[in-house]
Structure formats: C-alpha cells, structure tokens
Amino acid sequence: MVEFLPPPSLHIIIGLVNKLFIGLAGECKEVAMEWTRSLHIIRDDFHGSHFPGQSCQILLGNVDSLMLLVRTQTKTAIVFKYANALRNLKKVADGCFRRILADDLKESVDKFKSSYIKTGLPITSKAHVTFTHLVEFTGTTKESLLQYTEEAHESIHQEFKKTWSKHSLRDVQHPKY
C-alpha cells in the first residue's frame, strides 16, 4: 500500500522544523529567538504561529549560524542536540526531496531518527512517517519525492484564499448567503 501513498514532503519538513524549533525555544528561548532574528524570519500567525515552508528551508540552511550564537557551556549541549537534529533533517530532505534520490538515504534517516530522539521530543506522526515510511516508499518506487510534492497545491490554495477573502459572504443574514 505504501507505494500508492507518497509521504507529504512539504508538510513533513514544515512539521518537523517547527517541532524542533519549539523544542529549542522551550529549552533555550533567547538563542532560538536571536537565531530567527539574525535570519530575518518571523513566525507567521497566518500559518498557525509556525514557520511556512520557505522559512523552514532558510532555517535548515543556516544551522551552523545557530551554534555561533551560543555563549555559555550549559547552553551549548542544549542547542547542539537541536542543531544536530536540524542538520540531519536537512540531509534527509536533500536526499529525497530533490530531483535525484540519494544512495545513502537510509543512513541519513537513521541519523536523523537518532538525533531527533536525543532531543526528547515526542514522536509525532510526521516523525514516524519520516523514520519508517520515507525509505520504504522511495525504496519501492526508486524515485525521489520531488514529483509528489504538494507545494504546487499549497501555492494554489494560498492564492485562492486571497480571492475567497475578497468575495466570500460572511454575513449569514445576507440575501445571497
């Protein structure tokens, strides 16, 4: 059955990056906030107070800058476990969400799983899909997830929301409602 249901790559990345950021902010808020400010990224209330896809990609691409913000030995260990998980998540994303499927995807997923578990965060459904079904799907299809991404659908969805907000009837008493 797994070969018919590709893992939702966009939502996996958004969910896991946000989960890891929330964990980091819960343990080391000032470093987390300084990191996002340094990258000119804010959490958008429109997206449920989460980072949207593009912001998640920026965070994954700038994990090394996170470690540069740590100023005390105590915080180094805390920040390192989240930075390591984010770095390993980027390797997973690069291995299966790009045009060419990486040969070492299983090893990348295993490293990510290990580093994610070390954060102490709960195993969410997106984490489970990544740990279990990502390699299973790509192993069956021998294809990356790029052609299955839901990004185009989400872009259309966001554009439709603009039109809907201009033309929708919210007043239940309106005669055309």
Image (tube, helix red, strand yellow):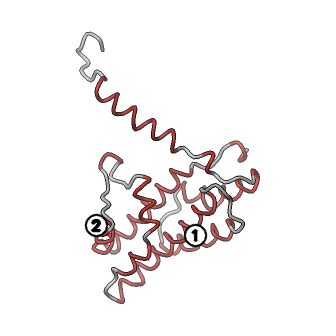
Q: Quadrant of the C terminus?
A: top left
The residue positioned farthest toward the bottom in the image shown: 73
* Picture coordinates of residue 65, whole percent (x, y): 39, 76
Give the farthest residue toward the front. 99
From mark 2 to mark 1, how far is it between C-alphas? Answer: 26 Å
Quarter-of-image position of residue 175? top left
**Residue 163, horizontal then vertical, whole percent:** 34, 28
Asked whether 122 or 43 is in front, the reply is 43
Residue ID at (28%, 67%): 37
The residue depicted at 52 percent of the width and 75 percent of the height is 118
Between marks 2 and 1 in the image, the one whose residue lies nearer the viewer: 2
Three-letter code for the amino acid on which mark 1 is drawn: Phe
Who's the residue at 39% across and 35% down the image?
159
Count neighbours of disc 1 (C-alpha within 10 A) and say few if under 14, some if 14 to 19, many if 20 or more. many
Give the left or right position of residue 25, taking residue 133 as reference. left
> Pointer 2: residues within 10 angstroms few (<14), some, or many (20+)?
few
The secondary element bearing badge 1 is classed as helix
Q: Judging from the image, what secondary structure is the residue with disc 2 in?
A: helix
Q: Which mark is residue 37?
A: 2
Q: Position of residue 64 (x, y in %)?
A: 43, 76
* Amino acid type, label 2: Arg
Return the x and y of residue 119 as percentages of the image width and height: 48, 73
| Picture quarter with the N terminus | top right
Tell me if residue 14 comes above or below residue 163 in the rendering: below
If you read the primary sequence from the N terminus, does the residue marked by circle 2 or circle 1 appear first? 2
User: Which residue carries the number 1 mark?
Assistant: 112
- Residue drawn at (32%, 52%) of the image: 49
**Above or below, 112 relative to 132:** below
